[in-house]
Image (cartoon, rainbow, N blue to C red):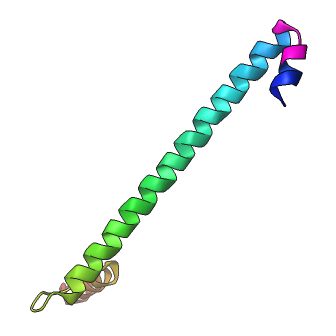
Amino acid sequence: MTGQALQRREPERRYPILLTLLAQSAVDVLDETLLLFDQAISGRESAAKQKVAEAPGRARPPSVEDSNLDRRAARTAKPT
């Protein structure tokens, strides 16, 4: 809806439309901000993982698969 079309509307209809547009704009800006934040965090995490992987003499961080294997090994090692 254009500004000119809004001006032609009666105030009882104009202001609710403007408030709705304002609220939707706030949601859109928040969504975009969160997307940018998520991209920044993902980029930093990827860079950190690569730095750790390339560091000489450093063990790789444990993964989810490693912890699952550790739990399975602990279950099988327990006497029943």
Q: Is residue 33 left or right of residue 62?
A: right
The extreme front residue here reads 4
Q: Is residue 43 left or right of residue 12?
A: left
Query: Where, by quadrant of the figure, is residue 63 drawn?
Result: bottom left
Q: Can residue 53 be seen in the rendering of this structure?
A: yes
Query: 7 above or below 35?
Result: above
Task: Identify the residue at image location x=47%, y=55%.
Answer: 36
33 within the magenta span: no
Query: 31 above or below 58?
Result: above
Task: Identify the residue at image location x=20%, y=81%.
Answer: 52
> Could you tell me residue 43's position as x and y percent?
38, 68
Q: Can residue 62 be seen in the rendering of this structure?
A: no
Q: Nearer the viewer, residue 60 or 12?
A: 12
> Could you tell me residue 79's position as x and y percent?
18, 86
The extreme left residue here reads 57
Number of residue marks: 0
Most common secondary structure along the magenta stretch: helix
Task: Identify the residue at image location x=19%, y=84%.
Answer: 78
Q: Is residue 16 left or right of residue 7?
A: left
Query: 37 above or below 52?
Result: above
Q: Quadrant of the C terminus?
A: bottom left
> Could you tell me residue 49's position as x and y percent?
28, 78
Task: Identify the residue at image location x=39%, y=66%.
Answer: 42
Query: For the magenta stretch, what is the residue range?
Result: 7-11
Q: Quadrant of the N terminus?
A: top right
> Could you tell me residue 4's position as x and y percent?
86, 23
Query: Where, by quadrant of the figure, is residue 70 drawn?
Result: bottom left
Query: Where, by quadrant of the figure, is residue 12 drawn?
Result: top right
The extreme top residue here reads 11
